[in-house]
Amino acid sequence: MPTDLSNLSNDLAKATEQASAGIVAVQARPRIGTSGIVWRKNLILTSSEGIRFDEGIRVLLPNGNVTEARLRGRDPGTDLALLEADTGAIAPLEFTQTQVKAGQLVLAIGRTANTGPIASFGIVSGVAGEWKSWRGGKLDPFVRLDVSVYPASSGAAAVDATGALMGLVSTGLSRTSVLAVTRSTIDRVAQKLHDHGHVSRGFIGVAIQPVALPSDVKEKQKLDQDSGLIVLGIEPGGPGAGAGLSIGDVLLSGGGHTFTDPETLAGVLDGVSAGESLDFRVLRAGAVQQVKITIGERPRREK
């Protein structure tokens, strides 16, 4: 007679079977394969961490066919890479329509060339707001998974108990946690990879750190913030140097945001395209000045 446990087991097996119909195996690094999901017709999303060479990429489809894939673009900051391949009649995976919440059951479903679909089971252990990866990319929301992963699970699908897609499994964005790159981040980043081959992020070419503002300067300049970002270094020929920034200047605000930590400035720059100009409020020699900076493109780290 069926029990709750056997029903759950059958439901998880059904969810795995349903999702694996849109999951491929990717061979883009020596010896160890990774996984990917069919995002749109002839377009596959996988982990940027799993891409070790740009040519000769092979993809094993759910029907057993092997096809060549072309790298359309990659973004190490969000651990996303976009491949183009003939996916035939494979239907793209459908994203869940419900909000991802801590405590939800999750399956990490990938595919290997030798064993076919692989699955591991756990929960969503944490959900938070915007988060900046150590490689400079932005995840919004931040979703951490408590789930065992295998080498081939990089780029796998994180799905809910119904088989609907929560996001892409990432093992390369955190040194301590397995994360899921969810729909809002995928929609923002993957479209840029499709159109441009990379994600352009704003860059002003300065080294900064937070600094407390002296009380007498705050009072004299009528500043309503306790700290800013002091410029410790300037890249020669960079946007900051071209705008006349000097070591010792303190960045107070720009782009509608007050700068109290480096993450705030990085968030502003992420939303600005190279070539646009922003007005910054700068504290220099005890006086507040307006400095217009033409934003450059942050140098890319491909590997």
Image (cartoon, helix red, strand yellow):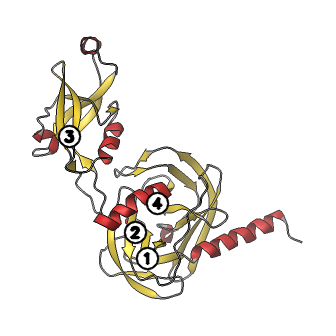
Q: Secondary structure at mark 1?
A: strand
Q: Are marks 2 and 3 in contact (CB under 8 Å)?
A: no
Q: Which residue is mark 4?
A: 171
Above or below, 218 against 137 in this view is above
Instruction: Return the x and y of residue 216 as percentages of the image width and height.
Output: 26, 11
The image quarter in which residue 291 lies: top left
Instruction: State the residue lying farthest toward the right.
Output: 1
User: Disc 4 marks which amino acid?
Assistant: Thr
Q: CA distance from mark 4 to mark 2?
A: 10 Å
Q: Which mark is residue 206?
A: 3
- Residue at x 10%, y 44% (from the top left corner): 236
Above or below, 118 against 285 in this view is below
Q: Are marks 3 and 4 in contact (CB under 8 Å)?
A: no
User: Disc 2 marks which amino acid?
Assistant: Gly
Instruction: Return the x and y of residue 300 as percentages of the image width and height.
Output: 25, 57
Q: Which residue is mark 1?
A: 26
Q: Are marks 1 and 2 in contact (CB under 8 Å)?
A: yes
Q: Which residue is mark 2?
A: 50
Q: CA distance from mark 3 to mark 4?
A: 30 Å
Residue 140 lies left or right of residue 287; in this view the side is right
- Residue at x 28%, y 20% (from the top left corner): 213
Q: Are marks 4 and 2 in contact (CB under 8 Å)?
A: no
Neighbours of disc 2 within 10 Å: few (<14), some (14-19), many (20+): many
Q: Is residue 14 visible?
A: yes
User: Disc 1 marks which amino acid?
Assistant: Val
Q: CA distance from mark 2 to mark 3?
A: 31 Å
User: Earlier along the polypeptide chain: callout 2 or callout 3?
Assistant: 2
